[in-house]
Image (cartoon, rainbow, N blue to C red):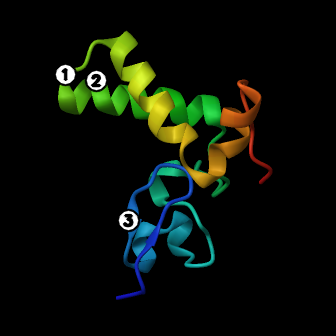
């Protein structure tokens, strides 16, 4: 077991190598925030995926889920520029 860290893009705890994107413990984002090629999802991609997850797991109305996802994501390190600028942000890969 690794020292626990938190995904910079969604806040998921990452305790094992398998939790990190591509199993690479040097990556600061989790396997759920990675694209197939191993790069991190953009803010719009993560927002849509997170809102969809809230809808499917918590039964939230889509508008409410989007607002909740936006509030949660913008508090995370990967998306701080979104909160500061008020617009979409794509993290460099």
Name the residue at 39% across, 11% down: 63
Rendered image quadrant of residue 79: top right
Rendered image quadrant of residue 80: top right
**Pointer 3 residue:** 13
**In the image: residue 11, left or right of residue 33:** left
Answer whether residue 85 is visible to the viewer in this image: yes
User: In the rendering, at what x and y percent does residue 25 appear?
Assistant: 55, 78
Labelled pair 1, 2 in contact (Cβ < 8 Å): yes
Which numbered tag is attached to residue 55?
A: 2
Residue situated in front as seen by the camera: 37 or 90? 90
Labelled pair 1, 3 in contact (Cβ < 8 Å): no
Name the residue at 44% across, 21% down: 67
Specify few, some or many for label 3: CA neighbours under 10 Å numbering under 14, 14-19, or 20 or more.
some
CA distance for labels 1 and 3: 23 Å
**In the image: residue 68, left or right of residue 21:** left
Answer whether residue 49 is visible to the viewer in this image: no
**Pointer 1 residue:** 59
Q: Residue furthest front?
A: 84
Figure check: 90 above or below 20: above
Which mark sits nearer the N-terminus, 1 or 3?
3
């Amino acid at each position: 077991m690794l020292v626990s860290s938190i995904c910079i893009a969604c806040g998921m705890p990452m305790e094992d190598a398998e939790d990190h994107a591509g199993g690479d413990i040097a990556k600061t984002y989790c396997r759920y925030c990675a694209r197939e090629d191993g790069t991190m999802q953009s803010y719009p991609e993560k927002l849509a995926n997170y809102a969809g997850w809230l809808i499917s797991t918590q039964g939230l109305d889509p508008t409410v889920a989007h607002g909740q996802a936006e509030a949660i994501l913008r508090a995370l390190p990967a998306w701080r520029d979104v909160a500061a600028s008020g617009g979409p942000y794509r993290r460099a890969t």
